[in-house]
Image: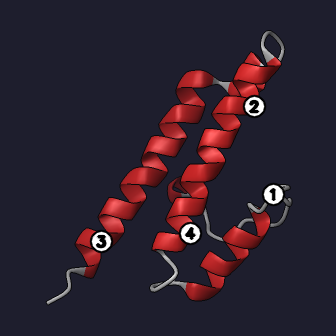
Amino acid sequence: QYDFKAYIDEVFGIVDEANELIDQKAPFKLVKEDVEAAKHVLAEAANMIRFVARALACVIPNASEEILRRYGTIIAIGDPLFPRRDEL
């Protein structure tokens, strides 16, 4: 028996961790003082996003594919794939 809600909750726990990382490390402020440290924070967040995309491939394959496309070697900019939680 599969518990999809528990699975999704686990995956989105990683999304929450990525958000906390960005909030705590503030890479867009950090870049003004330490470019390499900011790059490291953003690379870590991008890796977390790639992991989430792969984990969600079985649930939302099209969105997962688009996330992986955008977060390839060079990060691509595009319209949001999902609405913000606070806008739901």
| First of labels 3, 2 by sequence position | 3
| Residue matched to label 2 | 39
| First of labels 4, 2 by sequence position | 2
Q: Secondary structure at mark 3?
A: helix
Q: Nearer the viewer, residue 50 or 5?
A: 50
| First of labels 1, 3 by sequence position | 3
* Residue type beneath disc 3: Tyr
Cα separation between marks 1 and 3 = 27 Å
Query: In the image, what residue occupies the spot 31% across and 61% down?
Result: 10
* Residue type beneath disc 4: Ala
Q: Residue furthest left?
A: 1
Tell me if I can see residue 43 in this picture. yes
* Residue type beneath disc 2: Lys
| First of labels 3, 4 by sequence position | 3
- Per the rendering, the mark at residue 73 is 1
Cα separation between marks 2 and 1 = 13 Å
Cα separation between marks 1 and 4 = 15 Å
Asked if labels 3 and 1 touch by Cβ distance under 8 angstroms, the answer is no
| Residue matched to label 4 | 53
* Residue type beneath disc 1: Thr
